[in-house]
Amino acid sequence: MIAAVVLLPSAIAAAATTQAADVLLSQGKPVATSTIESSSYTGAKAVDGSTTTRWASAEGADPQWLRIDLGQSASIHRVVLNWEAAYAKKYRIEVSDDGTSFTTAATVDTGDGKIDDLGGLTARGRFVRFVGLTRGTSYGYSFWEMQVFGSTDSSGDTQAPTTPAGLAAGTATATSVPLTWGAATDNVGVTGYDILRNGTAVATSATTSYTDTGLTPATSYTYAVRARDAAGNASPASTPITIKTAAGSAGFVLAAAGDIAEQCTASSSGCVHPKTAKLVENMNPAAVITMGDNQYDEPTLSDFKNYYDKTWGKFKNITHPVPGNHESYSGFTGYDQYFGAIAKPQGKRYYSWEMGNWHFIALDSNDFVTHDEFAEPPQITWLKQDLADNTKSCVAAYYHHPRWSSGDHGDNKDSIELWNLMVANKVDLVLNGHDHDYERFVPQNADGKADANGPVEIVGGSGGANLYDLSPAHATTAKLLKTFGVLKLSMTDTSFQTQLIGVDGKVLDSSPTYTCHQ
């Protein structure tokens, strides 16, 4: 055994030798996970018998887990973890009869990323769970295979349920298929159903319905279901059906930055916004997002025309802007006059728009610097309704003042209410400016703690205004740079990935590919 393992007497007992009847119990079984880095690294890849495919959790967050449903109660004598580079220093192996209440079977406190072969176990249960506690790298947790060895129970109920009938699909979207079927019967009682996609069990359901999500647009999938009882007996799989997901968008690229145009032109070598505009041109984006302070200092219409318009103005017809604090200094007059209808596409300086399977929310965070704390701002009322009405699976929001920042301005308490709404509504991405730097955070919750269920926040105030000094990075900071550049956002119907492109055209930072929450 490579890593030091502590066997807990409350859950297991040491065994002198692995029992001769041990078999591999986990391969091909249904898997659930806390998170995945992307659709290429699903939990099923950890039990597919291949050492070239793997599960990977979201980057930079503890704890994370992967749970295997063995299908019936079993005696568990050995667990083998074949790690990829993103290993765990500390983790637990847990077992459960019901998939909810778990008992610790073993702990590892000195993991080193080699193959961990945890033998001598006599745990018993239907579910086996890996729980990563402390990462060995700045990434997440990732292993090629998790193998559980032991023997299945042979006593008691051995009669399998009847085969479920009437499997049918509702209206498929580009990324999901809703399934229903008739109830199976059993001599003791049916406890659940396995959902098989293309012959592999991908989920379990306690009811006679399930919606399979995270699928690829315009792709055919074959489904079947089988019933299970409390003893783990499984029925034959139902008659399969084949469903094709709806066509989705082919994916698109957006360009984004805040704090853009100083009062200078390309004739000055130190003028940066002409250089960042060139980056946007090279990206050939489907749309451009600006996160405020588009023009400095207290911009009039003539300022916008003399500076911003000569560079970033080339993309005005595809730009979805929001104002920053500098636009507010002149009562937004220059901003409103220059951008015209696109400054208030829905009558206000806050609005929403859509592209592909994405819902974008553009907000005026100046409202929250000065609003009456005893009354809910109209923008918040609008935002709550906009989020409630959204039907897209992926959501991004952008506004000037960031909730979290390691830049000169630091964390912004005026944005707390906005951030909390983003967390509560499972928004995927939040873009900000204000601090003249670049900072990408791992997903965070309302308290600013790493949480895979929270939004990814990126401060992209690097569009051309003079850079600010940096403060110490937050614990959740994935990358912090004092540099100019433009965000390149690569969006699909189910995921997103971000890059910061520097003025020399080089990639200065790349995020993982994140799967949308909804």
Image: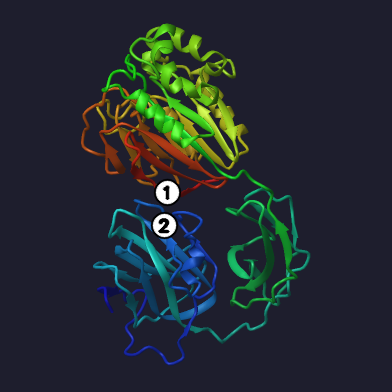
> Where is residue 238, by image quadrant?
bottom right
Q: Mark yes or no: residue 79 visible.
A: yes
Location of residue 104 in the rendering, given as x and y in whole percent from the top left corner: 37, 69
Front in this rendered view, residue 27 or 158: 27
Query: Mark 1 or mark 2: which comes first in sequence?
Result: 2
**Residue 363 against residue 370 in the figure, above or below:** below
Q: Would you call the spot at circle 1 few (<14 residues within 10 Å), some (14-19), or many (20 or more)?
A: many
Q: Is residue 323 left or right of residue 297?
A: right
Residue under the point 37% across and 72% down: 82
Looking at the rendered structure, the kind of residue marked 2 is: Ser
Q: Which residue is mark 1?
A: 452
Evaluate if marks 1 and 2 touch, with contact meaning CB atoms under 8 Å apart: yes
Residue under the point 27% across and 43% down: 475
Q: Circle 1 sits in a helix, a strand or a loop, which is it?
A: loop
Location of residue 259 in the rendering, given as x and y in whole percent from the top left corner: 36, 23
Front in this rendered view, residue 508 or 8: 508
**Residue 18 against residue 343 in the figure, above or below:** below
Q: Circle 2 sits in a helix, a strand or a loop, which is it?
A: loop
Location of residue 346 in the rendering, given as x and y in whole percent from the top left corner: 59, 19
Quarter of the image with the N terminus in it: bottom left
Residue under the point 59% across and 45% down: 250
Label 1 or label 2, whichever lies nearer to me, is 2
Looking at the rendered structure, the kind of residue marked 1 is: Ala
Front in this rendered view, residue 510 or 106: 510
Quarter of the image with the C terminus in it: top right
**Residue 371 against residue 54 in the figure, above or below:** above
Q: Which residue is mark 2?
A: 57
Which colour scheme appears in the figure?
rainbow
